[in-house]
Amino acid sequence: MARTHADRYGVTQCGEEKPECSGCVKRSIACIYLAPRDVRNVSVSASDHGSSNLTSPREPHVNATSHAVDGTNARSSIIAVVRESPLNYGSSGRSSPQESQLNVTSHAANGTNDGPFASPVAVQESHSPSTLFTMDDMSLLHHWTLSTSLSIAESKPFHSYWQSVFPQMALDHPYMMHGILSVAALHLAHLHTGTTEKHAVTAARHHNMALRGFQDTLGNLNDQNSDALFACSNLNVIYVLRSSVERGSTARPDSDSTDRISQALGAEWIPMLRGVEAVLGSVYQRVSVGPLRAMLDIGNWDALDPDTSPSAEQTYLRQVREIWSGAGGDPVYDEALYLLRKCCVYVRQFIEPGHERSGPPEENRRVWSGYLFWFHYAPDAYFLRLQQRQPVALVLFAYFGAIFYGAKDFWFVGDCGRNIVKVVDELLGDYWKAVLKWPKETVGLD
């Protein structure tokens, strides 16, 4: 009877040739010998997930020189291969990428998998049904690792979180894996215009699956899923931002497009952004002591005072207050404006020439996310007025759009700021033309 052999390429069958396996001779590699039962027992445990020894996918470090029979070395080696190089993982019985699937399923308490061992790697998610990820999905994960994750991170110290920690965490939480794949597919849609529709459909499918798992998990918060919930909420923000830009940009400007206007005014993405606060409030204490704690560090935000930071944009922002100050002022608009000015000062310290020498440390660098602090801190009453499309609330939102335009080079932000200013200008008309002059000039509409 043929024996199963594990190596960095997967689990294969051979005829037990002596003294060397013919498959290994062909590949010029050493092989780890496993008994059939050992193959079925290979799984990813919580201890593997908690490991802090993360390495780059470009530097596989699998040690396949020893022929152990206890399964321990084989187990860690196969896990390392899957985590570090998804596209190098496979088994000899697979006929096509479409037919090949990585089985992600729940486990018994002992971590074993007694089903057919089409795949030797299983991911734990105690409350989830069996989930299948195809080789097309693994291709998306590969793209995430090598490209998408690096395009989101705002500084080199954060590269490892998006590139390595998020995928590692997703091995234990399939809904988070779907979140990663949805953003990777959107990135491909942005990069390859010829296949935009195909990748957009794939992104929407994974996003819907991510949301279902996310919502189910919210009702069962614990120490094991808090970090994944926080990470997935950040992935959702990226997805809805890019989706709103696409939908707002593809609608005809001359059409009476309710969807185009709603997208620009944040009908979908503002609730998502503010929803992160609700999630964070539930899991903050857990996340603050976990592997993602650095993502909660907002640096010197509390110490900043926009009144002591003169700049051209601060001048324009202070002037807009004249709209409501003549009627005795309005504390809601005053607070929203002050916080918007503070966001400008916060981001400016990371993009001003010479900020590397005099600004905050690189690990605190925030650009696109720094602008979005406004949605976290601004009063609820302001966003209610924006939803009601009150003119002053719309004007203030146009100023946010002009400022957010500074993050346009991030692919998932793009023309979001410009779309905001354009729609507000259409809604308010000539009466507010003078007030909207600076936002329109900033985004190139005048």
Image (spheres, rainbow, N blue to C red):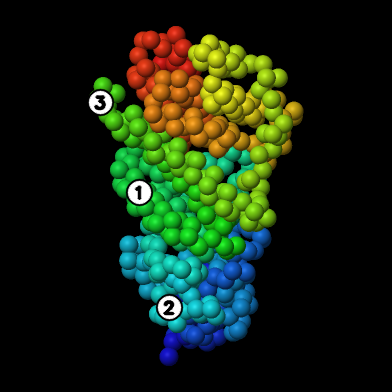
**Residue 117 shows which numbered tag?**
2
Which residue appears at 61% of the width and 36% of the height?
366
Measured in 3D between alpha carbons, the distance from the residue under mark 2 to the one under mark 1, in whole angstroms, is: 30 Å
**Amino acid at circle 1:** Ala
Residue 357 horizontal/vertical position (percent): 74, 29
The residue tagged 3 is 256
The residue tagged 1 is 204
Tell me, yes or no, whether the two marked residues, 2 and 3, touch with CB atoms within 8 Å.
no
- Label 3 or label 1, whichever lies nearer to me, is 3
Measured in 3D between alpha carbons, the distance from the residue under mark 3 to the one under mark 1, in whole angstroms, is: 25 Å
Up the image or down, 329 lies above or below 165; here it is: above
Residue 435 horizontal/vertical position (percent): 46, 12
**Which residue lies most toward the front here?**
328
Residue 223 horizontal/vertical position (percent): 60, 62
**Which residue lies most toward the left here?**
255
Left or right, 348 with respect to 145, comes to right
Left or right, 358 with respect to 26, comes to right
Q: Tell me the SS state at disc 1.
A: helix
Which residue appears at 35% of the width and 32% of the height?
262
Which residue appears at 46% of the width and 68% of the height?
127
